Amino acid sequence: MLTINEFLTFEHDLEHDLEHDLAHKRDFSPPKIYTANGDISKRWYVYFSFRDPKTNKLKRQKNIYGNANTFKNKEDRLALLTRYRRRLLKLLQQGFNPYINNTELYKTKILKSQSANLNNILKPNNETRVEDQTITRLQNIIQNTKPNTESSKPKTEPIEEKGMTLREAFDYSLKLKENQISPRSLKDYEYTTNALVKWVAKNCPDIKTINQFDKKIASNFLNSILMATSSRNRNNYRLNLSSLCQVLENNDIIPSNPLKKIDALRSIPKRNKSYTSSEHKKIFEYLKKEDPLLLLYIKFISYNFLRPVEVCRLKIKDINIEDQTLQFKAKNSPLKTKLIPQKIINELPDLSKLDPEFSLFTPIKIGGEWATSETNKTNYFSKRYKTVVKEHFKLDKDQTLYSFRHTFISILYHALLKGSSQFAAKSELMEITGHTTMTALDKYLRGIDAKLPDDYSDLL
């Protein structure tokens, strides 16, 4: 089936002037050009509406991009879209309809006239090669559309749609994303695409190209993730795939991102349960004898309010004993500086003679080489904590290393509240924890249940 898009972007100009009167009620709106207010970083296109045969109302059709967005200046982009708009208008005036197969109409109204006048179109030998190639393409189309008795016979083999395979398309998208996201995020994206490609090969073997990957297939894949794991995990897969498909849409590999039309599901966020006063004191006393290195690791989380992965990122060069500060890569910023409490300074060994590029924490000592990813480092200390502490004290599964951050922020907040207003306490706390806004800090404190009311027994 020849679509109106194929007619429109065909390189040969199928034009003869059709500026006739259109006073009667039309089945389409005049095509228009969207230029994003001249912003060439966005996609430009031609758009129009056509009367839906079911509702008898004008309905917006798919945007027509063609090759316009490959041009990096306004003039060339607008010139090509203007040609598309003019051709689209003429095709619509000739009777082309996006809701039907227009092949026969194409043969009768266009190819017939072009074939009859083909000799008049042929140019002398001194004309450009581009026009010769155009005529050759036109002749090939005419020959391919001649009646053929075999064409009416049913075909047993499916016609494979041309285009990038799923693997090629996602590899291309990952390559473009590589320098925009962290190595950890890139690994997550790769894992997601591997799972999708494997699932499609098993459950939808007819799907070969990225152009065949639509909302239905994406929904079925996400449903399989939901049934096997959780809504939170399913939402993560959706987010990763949507990000990669958006890159493909922005680069005109696919017409639209199918994941945009799929909503995220409601999920219950994972909560790291805080420790009670007696619990964290028992853990600290126990680790003094059993694992002093793990205890110091925990104190960096507890007293500096760092995330476990942020502690694992620290190198010797990040610790400034003289200024009593440390620098680290935070969750939402490339580099942050925090004060090191004296309680930690007192427990650190002499770092001055160590290689500045050494990791601060290693499995056996403070300061040394540890050639592995930050994810592996974080997982190592989590497993070590589980073996040494959690199993010994039979702690709740939600009481993790991250829980120490919540615990000590709550302790500090309540200490700051004594003899001070809530606003003053939170203002000082925000400088210590590193939260960028009071709103973010309020949300965090509510999330860890740090903001509790005073005893209200006298009111009952």
Image (spheres, grey):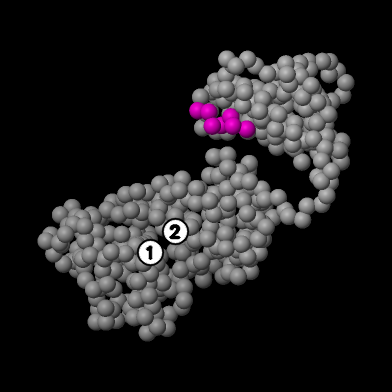
Q: Which residue is mark 2?
A: 187
Q: Residues within 10 Å of mark 2 (few under 14, many from 20)?
A: few
Quote the CA–CA distance across marks 1 and 2.
11 Å
Instruction: Determine the residue positioned at 31% across, 69% down.
Output: 298
Instruction: Determine the residue positioned at 84% across, 25% down.
Output: 26
Residue 440 versus residue 258: which sits nearer the camera?
258
Residue 395 found in image quarter: bottom left
The quadrant of the rendering that contains the C terminus is bottom right
Give the residues drawn in magenta, as a range. Answer: 66-72
> Residue 207: which numbered mark, if any?
none
Residue 104 found in image quarter: top right
Contact, CB < 8 Å: mark 1 with mark 2?
yes
Q: Which residue is mark 1?
A: 375
Instruction: Determine the residue positioned at 66% across, 33% down.
Output: 64
Whether residue 70 is in magenta: the answer is: yes
Residue 431 versus residue 231: which sits nearer the camera?
231
